Amino acid sequence: MTSEHPSAGASGNARYVIGVDVGTGSARAGVFDLVGRMVGSAKRDITLFHAAGSIVEQSSSEIWRAVCESVRDALAQASVSPDQIAGIGFDATCSLVVLGEGGQSLPVGPSEEAERDIIVWMDHRAVDQAERINATGHEVLKYVGGKISPEMETPKLLWLLENRPKVFEAAWQFFDLTDFLTWRSTGDLSRSTCTVTCKWTYLAHERRWDEDYFRTVGLGVLADEGFARIGDKVVDPGTPLGNGLTAAAAAELGLRAGTPVATGVIDAHAGGIGTVGADGQAEANLAYVFGTSSCTMTTTQAPVFVPGVWGPYFSAMVPDAWLNEGGQSVAGAAIERLLSMHPATAEAHVQAERLGLSLPSMLADLAAKGANDLSSSVLLAKGLHIVPEFLGNRAPLADPHARAVIAGLGMESDLVSLVALYIAGICSIGYGLRQIIETQDKAGAPIRRIVISGGAGRSDLVRQLLADATGKPVLAIQAEEPVLLGAAMLGGVAGGQFGDVRSAMGAMSQIAETYKPSAGAVAELHDKRFSAFKQLQSLAREIR
């Protein structure tokens, strides 16, 4: 994307910040001015390696190359000089990177390919380890909603120790992917409060690891080492690291050596930073990142313990505030899976390509044309009901064994029925979100509005359906890439352009659109559909 102000990059006095986002399928970079306008961006796809046993892996060296290429291309597109870059911030998925001495890649799975040195967040190889950890009932688990997820890092570390002991022993550092990127940029081994608190059981409110937890679950070796391999120095997001970019990293990225590098965050939390404070009311807003998976982030001044919702985490997103994190293990990916099952999908893909649209975008357009208004599109779903838990329930049930349910599916094979399936799927994502909101509300963490980001939630139709399904206003910010914006905000803080993260949030993010939930018959229909959602979800658990 190019700036609405193409001459902006020509001013030698102007200052810019870079945000880098490594998602599940791509690495992206964006160059932003200090009021949050993106003046250049670029993207590189990255490989996912799948194997039997719920194994999903990636390569840290491939990811670093993709990051460097994206940054160089974004900078060129923006026509911005490296000397104008005030700082750079990183975010990434909460995936586990395993490196040996000198940063050498180590194979984390049975492929024995050293390049495959990352256990991806969605890898569920450690379900058994997670269940054994949960069976201990350790006090630390209170801070992950009562149950640890196999998506988190200590179950994966335990799997490595038990199944690949030589790799575990040879490991020099275990990184969350974000912390790998900042180390690769600066040589600084500091970990982010966000990553280690949300995914590694670090107790940020006490600034410590809990030795007893690690010994209890079978990872006492990490405690014996003083946690040197998982982070003996933990700092808050936005903190400048080392002496900025090393000469080697700067050369690869096309930037100036010494450019300030911020302590990063998890990708969803970057989306939260980029959105939740846009109206200055972070505590009233739920940040909703709707991508491959979905994440919900709720900010409170005091800790709130919500069964089945991760947290409360201290200073993991908004400084000096508490965070509860929920979401769905698949969201955009659930819609893709649903659509892939329909007999009209292949033909619809061809039609969408002719129009220059993604399949979901085309279906959203068709739904909007087939209804009186966006809210009325729910009528197209008719008797079709879906529980989209293809990869378990992240929140509020914290059940990795949950699976999807589809009720009311007929023999139709036309485009109209494909649109109906799409609408039912989007509504089901909304009902899962509503379930999280209601659970948090009962526990004492209410929200008034939803601020949305993420690639799967860009269309007006999706936003309106989510507002109607949840009964909450959905707000969208001006920035097209809120996750990149959140990472760039951290770069701005590290580079001294803002006093703190809240200041950056207020300066670089503004609300653009508000989607109000419908009342009357549409609201009643969503209430009935939500009741059906919960009944099907409960029945599936009983059957299992």
Image (spheres, grey):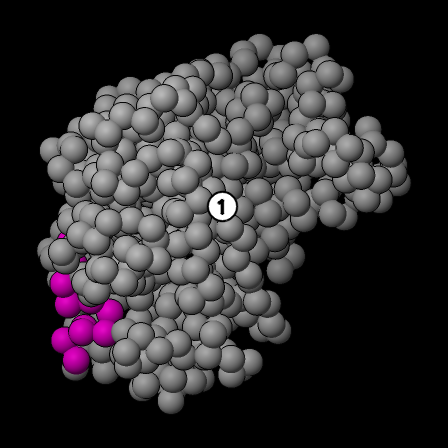
Front residue of 280 and 250: 250
Residue range (magenta): 225-235
Q: Position of residue 317 (x, y in %)?
A: 25, 42
Q: Which amino acid does label 1 sit on?
A: Lys
Q: Characterize the magenta stretch by its predominant secondary structure.
A: loop
Q: Is residue 538 magenta?
A: no
Q: Is residue 234 magenta?
A: yes
Please state the total of marks drawn on the protein image.
1
**Does 25 sit left or right of 200 as displayed?**
right
Vertical order, 154 against 283 (above or below): below
User: Which residue does the image show at 30% across and 38% down from the upper left?
Assistant: 81
Task: Say which quadrant the C terminus sits in.
Answer: bottom right
Quadrant of the rendered image containing residue 408: top right
User: Which residue does the image show at 82% across and 28% down from the upper left?
Assistant: 416
Quadrant of the rendered image containing residue 208: bottom left
**Does 67 sit left or right of 179 as displayed?**
right
Q: Position of residue 480 (x, y in %)?
A: 45, 28
Front residue of 80 and 290: 80
**Does 523 sit left or right of 351 as displayed?**
left
Front residue of 297 and 455: 455
User: Which residue does the image show at 31% across and 86% down from the upper left?
Assistant: 169
Q: Where is residue 49 in the image (x, y as percent from the top left)?
A: 57, 67
Which residue is under mark 1?
43
Residue 334 in sight: yes
Q: Where is residue 164 in the image (x, y as percent from the top left)?
A: 43, 85
